Image (tube, rainbow, N blue to C red):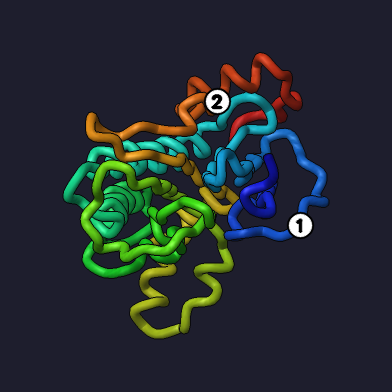
Amino acid sequence: MSWAYPSIVGSGPNATILHYPHSDRQMLAGDLLLVDAACNFQYMSPDITRTYPVSGTFTPVQKDIYSLVLRAQDEGMKVARSGSSLAAIHNRIVEVFKEGLLRLGLIADTSGEQYRMWFTHSAAHYIGIDVHDVGDRTRALQPGMSFVIEPGLYIRQAALDALPRTSANVALIEKIQPAVTKYTGIGIRIEDSFLLEPSGLRRLSSAVPRTIEEVESFMRERGAAPSTGAR
């Protein structure tokens, strides 16, 4: 076996940077650690990402974001069936994110693309010999197809700072800045590899802890840095 792709590992604010290339930051208690890593198996290149709390448990604000990402993946999995498509999976995840981000105060409305400040990539792609395998995202899914579902949210103050200072953007920033301050520095992605079978969807990465309870149990079993208090 060999790596399916170069691993992506980012802790703390680096978890908010998609495909962060370095791994030299010292982790601190209270950080999140995002690990995107997998190995080839029988000519298959899966793609798996998990986000772990360095202190062993998620803080309340980390749980807010993790719960939303997890729900988005769950809803995407419901759409992943024969006759559907990767585009349909992505669209359903966007719907969930819009609803949740509005509730958390991280966007001001759901009619446009404000969510793209925090969700910066596609929610699904094919896997095969190549970890990002070829294929039309609108093609009807059929048994035998393999793909990932990978919702993620990356809350960075820099995303607001980069907005052009139009009157509409200034009003948006004023409205959502308190929530951005509350959640900034949190980057969470949950990514699993799937095989569509005649009987339904099979999660190939089912042995990897996924829910909040599973991840925290995994951390307890292996030890974690002491917490410095909830944020």
Looking at the image, residue 101 sits to the left or right of residue 204; the answer is left
Residue 80 placement (x, y as % from top left): 26, 43
Kindly identify which residue carries mark 1: 22
Specify the quadrant of the image occupied by residue 20. bottom right
Q: Residue at x 68, y 39 (%)?
A: 1
- Is 126 or 208 nearer to us in this picture? 126
Specify the quadrant of the image occupied by residue 199. top left
- Is 197 or 85 nearer to us in this picture? 197
Compared to residue 6, the image places residue 1 above or below, namely above
Q: Residue at x 23, y 44 (%)?
A: 79
Q: Residue at x 28, y 51 (%)?
A: 89
Q: Amino acid at mark 1?
A: His
Within 10 Å of disc 2 (Cα), the crowding (few <14, some 14-19, many 20+) is some
Residue 96 placement (x, y as % from top left): 28, 48
Looking at the image, residue 223 sits to the left or right of residue 132; the answer is right
Residue 130 placement (x, y as % from top left): 53, 57
Q: Residue at x 30, y 34 (%)?
A: 201
- Seen as rendered, the residue at the extreme top is 221
Tell me whether circle 2 and circle 1 mark residues in contact (CB < 8 Å).
no
Kindly identify which residue carries mark 2: 215
Q: Amino acid at mark 2?
A: Val
Position of the C terminus, as image quadrant, is: top right
Marked residue nearer the N-terminal end (2 or 1): 1
- Seen as rendered, the residue at the extreme front is 42
Residue 207 placement (x, y as % from top left): 51, 24
Rendered image: mark on residue 176: none
- Is 171 or 192 nearer to us in this picture? 192
Mark 2 → mark 1, Cα distance in angstroms: 24 Å
Within 10 Å of disc 1 (Cα), the crowding (few <14, some 14-19, many 20+) is few
